Amino acid sequence: MSSFSFPIVGLVVAVFVLIFLVLRTRVHALIAMILAACIAGFTGGLSVTATLDAITRGFGSTLGTIGIVIGLGVMMGRILEISGAADQIAHFFIQWLGRRKEEWALALTGYLVSIPIFADSAFIILFPISSALAKKAGLSVLSLGVALAGGLIATHTLVPPTPGPLGVAGLFGVDVGEMILLGLSLAVPCTLSFVWYAKWLAKKYPGFIDPAPTSEIPEPDYEKHFNDRTGKALPGLTVSLLPIVVPILLIMIKSAISLFPSLSADQSAPVYWIVTAFHFLGSPIIALCISTLLAVYTLVPHLDRRQTATKLEEGLQSAGIILMVTGAGGALGFVVRESGTGAQIADQISRLPFSPVMIPFFVASAMRLIQGSATVAMITSASITAPILQQVPGVNMLFAAQAAAIGGFLFSYFNDSLFWVVNRMIGVTDTRQQIMAWSVPTGISWAVGGILIALINLIWGSGGSWLDPVIPGLILAILLATAFSTK
């Protein structure tokens, strides 16, 4: 076997071992990634010392880039969970959009709330609103629940500072502000697909509609519902939105300034100090520090110093394993880069009939089906493909990063915790209905996102091909045909 092919075969073996360990054994994904990195290093020609050194450096450099941001993000998200901010946002959109727009209101709530809060937790917090709406207004709890979950999963999958897309941004080395802006844009059509499908579900399964509606939920009843559940009043809408909106605006302003080099080069005092201030405030670490402080001092002023620290540390506990898996993904990617395997595979990828940008999309999709976790799927895909695509001339790494994140949508089913959370809380017990209620719409959103990122790359990227949207387009057609033909 030639020296050219052996490292590539070694990487294939490493990925196979990674998948086997995660899927068929009790070995955790963290350890599986480290073992895969060792195999990739040894077969790529690195010595034992060089392999271990690459693993350590890759792990450290990855967490050095995004570890603090992930930690701050989950701390801020924890305050939003316990304060009632998410409930207040839902309440506002339901009142604002009015009757017969409840699915849109809940989807929009999920779209905003899940940027800093994990989708599973946010659904558990907000689902009682869906249930109460269904009973009061004679609506389908299935339709409302799927719309809410769809909005949650869209931004949870595509928009930093949610740990998955944030980790992907770090592994691909793309600007977080640009990742946020593109993710927010792509999450809109994905959310719309959930809402349209949810409305169709209400007609297909009328058994989830309350037969004896009373009236719309008046504000006093809603306030009482929240007060009884938490023992405190809802925070105001402005303070509920501030911790979400402020960091996004700061990061995006910094990214916008970087698009105009003349501003950074201007040495006049006012311009210089304004640009410098936004470069500082718009760095993800500082922006999320500000948002966390806003959440603490505006949303939970009733907590003392010890209680506040406890709540923030609860958020960090949930981030621990994500930090470790992300760091391990960075270690695997660094080994692939250092061994030269990435450059060899890049040469082969450049000859494929479709764009290299779609490689992380397909890898993340496969990982999602195999092991269930969207976060693990996109980070694994990024760790494998980023060092390869960096060797391919002209690849837009931002589009590639978003492609990896979109791949994490694909067909949530039995090995995904959110599949069970959504179906069990809504009350869907039949297996076929469970797949129709959650697996099919996640597959549809995956296809919509895949088609869009392929077209975006075709228009604004380089090396795009009209073949890129074909596979997600075909799967979209199959899913729609299956859904509409199922009795």
Image: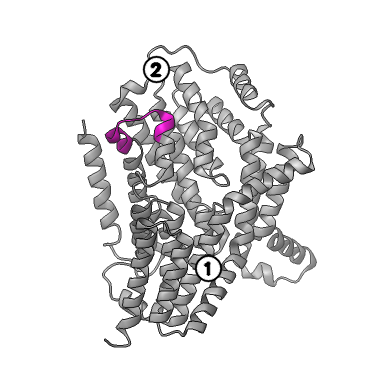
**Secondary structure of residue under mark 1:** loop
Q: In front: 132, or 6?
A: 6
Observer-side mark, 1 or 2, equals: 2
Residue that mark 1 sits on: 173
Question: Residue 303, percent across and down?
Answer: 76, 37
Give the magenta range: 423-436
**Secondary structure of residue under mark 2:** loop
Quadrant where the N terminus lies?
Answer: bottom left
Quadrant where the C terminus lies?
Answer: top left
Q: Is residue 399 visible?
A: no
Mark 1 and mark 2: Cα distance apart in space: 50 Å
Question: Residue 230, percent across and down?
Answer: 64, 27
> Within 10 Å of the Cα at label 1, are there few (<14), some (14-19), or many (20+) other Cα atoms?
some
Question: Residue 155, percent across and down?
Answer: 49, 47
Residue that mark 2 sits on: 210
Task: Decide whether residue 252 is among the magenta residues.
Answer: no
